[in-house]
Image: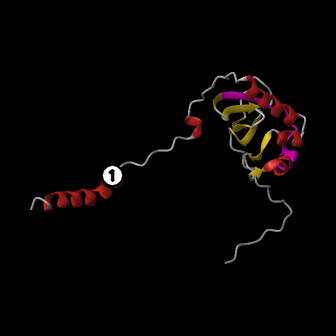
Amino acid sequence: MRARVPSLLCLALLACAPARAQEQPEPVPMPPAALPAVALPTVALPPELAGVLRDYEQAWTQKQPAALAALFAADGMALPNGSEAARGPAQIAARYAAAAGAPLSLRPLAYAVTHDMAYVVGGFAPTAGEPDLGKFVLVLRRGPDGAWKIVADIDNMNAQPQASEPEPAAADAPSVAPPP
């Protein structure tokens, strides 16, 4: 009889569990506009990591996709917003060939370094001091020569692109009546 009581209790609890789960209210998603804006402070990077960001800015602004690709490790990946991933120098240079050329200022918000790996999290804008238009994460690896190379470059915009308005129908276009 004693062995049956715990078994029956467990069965009763399991039978009630789905009912309790259904009683829980669903979380209410908060629209992005309702979230408070948080301005994160810029952090100072160690010189070798800051150099990677400055070289990236310069190569991007001067539309030098080969120089951008040279900042990456041989197996590095670029994961740009709204684009397929690119791996290796040839794909990265090709991916950035069309995109690079605009003014760029990278602003570090956080970083960490552990042995031969590091990351930098930051924001980007066309010019230093302007509000960030987007954010990025760089994962870096120190090579045998001591140079830091980008292993992964992930970026995205802060705002979703605006949907384009559909073209209004031409006034002289023939109208089509719906089928009866």
Residue 127: x percent and y percent?
A: 80, 27
Q: In this view, does 1 lie above or below 47?
A: below
Disc 1 marks which residue?
Answer: 23
* Closer to us: 102 or 74: 74
SS of the residue under disc 1:
helix
* Quarter occupied by the N terminus: bottom left
Figure quadrant of residue 52: top right
Residue 110 drawn in magenta: no
Is residue 30 visible to us here? yes
Residue 102 drawn in magenta: yes
Q: Is residue 127 above or below residue 67?
A: above
| Identity, as a three-letter code, of the amino acid under mark 1 | Glu
Crowding near the residue tagged with mark 1, few <14, some 14–19, many ≥20 C-alpha atoms within 10 Å: few
Residue 171: x percent and y percent?
A: 84, 59
What residue occupies the far front of the structure in this picture? Answer: 144
Judge from the rendering whether residue 114 lies leftward or rightward of residue 142; answer left or right: left
Q: Name the residue rendered at 27%, 58% in the picture.
A: 14
Q: In this view, does 66 lie above or below 7?
A: above
Q: Name the residue rendered at 74%, 32% in the picture.
A: 124
* Closer to us: 62 or 40: 62
Region in magenta: 94-109
